[in-house]
Image (tube, rainbow, N blue to C red):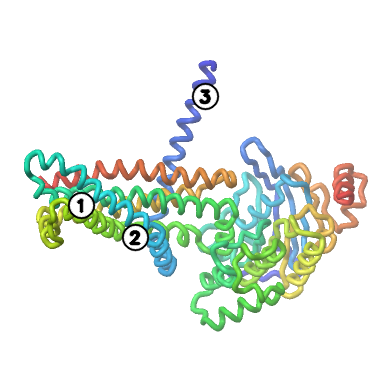
Amino acid sequence: MSANKKQFVYGKTLDNALLAVYNAYVFFIRFFREVFRGRMEFQEIVKQCYAIGNRSLLLISLTGFITGMVFTKQSRPSLSEFGATSWLPSLVAIAIVRALAPLVTALISAGKIGSSIGAELGSMRVTEQIDAMEVSAVNPFKFLVVTRVLACTIAIPVLMFYCSLVSLLGAFLNVTLNEGTSFIAFFENAFEQITFLDIWTSVAKAVAYGFTIGIVGSYQGYNASKGTEGVGKAANSAVVTSMFLIFVEEVIIVQVSNYFRI
Amino acid sequence: MEEDFKPGEPVIEVRDLYKSFGDLHVLQGVDLTVTKGENMVVLGRSGTGKSVLIKIMIGLLKQDRGDCVVLGKEVSKLEGNDLRDLRLKIGFSFQNSALYDSMTVRENLEFPLVRNIPNLTRAEIDEQVEYVLDAVGLLQTINQVPAELSGGQRKRIGIARTLILKPEIMLYDEPTAGLDPITCLEINELINEVKEKYQTTSIIITHDLTCARATGDRIAMLLDGKFLKTGTFEEVFDTEEERIKSFYDYNFIQ
């Protein structure tokens, strides 16, 4: 490839990347403008919240339970070296509430809900259903995007609490089978070390992750093009981009919460 | 203030319209006038920009240059509520019907109605939905989902969904594409019935000469980004122009 051609390709790639960032920014700003404008589609928000919960409940129950049980099993040898297995419930609880439950919920939801929003809106875009709403003088952004983003922002924190509970039950099962700890003793010990800051940080994480999953999925789907290929691409990009952003947000929120902890 | 158009007065005026997609120059100086109460057919081969033209008329696309005035308003300059008000007066029937596939037929029809005419009672909504479904002859499909309907039924429901807002102008994008000849005739009849019953002005985009002859008061032949000839069916095809003749012959052979 000649130097000129290389420069052109890199230039075009940079142009496209900047354009993509600009378009995402415009979409993001439009969301906040539309939330407070016109009538709110409460019925659609409730429907989407139900769909999100319904779609991911089984998967979150399974992964949450397994995460709690496996994490407990893996942590036991290190603690038993110091004769500190009695700390297991509080260690596991801190790990679950602070990091594991929000992350597991977010990653499962990104795969299950983010891809589904991307594919659904993408398919509506390529089959002109979004255009059909627009020509019927209905605001498709308000009906499709705002409702889905709000539903994710509301439903994912609820799922995160549910995931924490199920993970703790998984951990309890492992602890009670090995150490014979009672249910009350386990949970008393577990919650001893959990502070309000831990809970609020988890909620903040889940809200941020939920919003991210909703807005990324909607952005990818709403702007899908090129027929069925575009739908697949939208679903795929929704998952990959939201997972990446979830980890970036995790780092930022942990840094901020640690600042308050000290 | 709302402008009131009388029969014969122009409700759609397109002047020197240009539209390109990258290097593809689709419309290259299009002029068209459609008068109130008229059924105008835009004929042309696939990819000549027929659908682009009506998408500009309803504000889904913006022209690069030129004017597109619908009901006295330049569409490209409208935004927000002004654009919404204009769209309420225009019905757009999509080529693939574009029915909301997660909703039943009833919900598809209710969707634009309840969002544009608030405070309707349940009985009023039901009455209007049933009226338009009856008008397109598909009242029995009211609780079905689009996946359970045939191509012709989907087209009819698509038309019913636009009629529920009682539009002044109907834009039909390839209404007979992909349908069998009998269903095509039924759709042609429906387009004429809609004109009579709802007193609409229509633009029908098609490459089907049977549809053009059956539904069009006038025909505009779009070739190479411009209207080559406009007039009645006989006026347009009574010509020695090679491209129009070959279009006619090809359709006839088909």
For residue B170, say whether it is visible: no
The residue wearing badge 3 is A8
Residue B57, above or below A238: below
Q: Residue A20's image quarter? A: top left
Q: Is residue A63 left or right of residue A218?
A: left
Element on which disc 3 rests = helix
Work out how far the residue at label 1 is from the one at label 3, CA to CA, in angstroms: 59 Å
**Percent position of residue A153, x then y:** 34, 57
Q: What residue type is labelled 3?
A: Phe
Work out how far the residue at label 2 is from the one at label 3, CA to CA, in angstroms: 45 Å
Q: Are marks 2 and 3 on the same chain?
A: yes
**Percent position of residue B68, x then y:** 66, 54
Rendered-image quadrant of the N terminus of chain B:
bottom right
State the residue in front, B76 or B103: B103
Tag 1 subunit = A
> Sequence order check: which comes first, mark 2 or mark 3?
3
Neighbor class of circle 1 (other Cα within 10 Å; few <14, some 14-19, many 20+) is: some
Q: What residue type is labelled 2?
A: Ala
Q: Which amino acid does label 1 sit on?
A: Asn
Work out how far the residue at label 2 is from the one at label 1, CA to CA, in angstroms: 29 Å
Q: Which residue is drawn at 52% across and 57% down?
A: B79
State the residue in front, B59 or B121: B121
Q: Do labels 2 and 1 share a chain?
A: yes
The residue wearing badge 1 is A174
Q: Residue at x 11, y 42 (%)?
A: A80
The residue wearing badge 2 is A155
> Sequence order check: which comes first, mark 1 or mark 3?
3
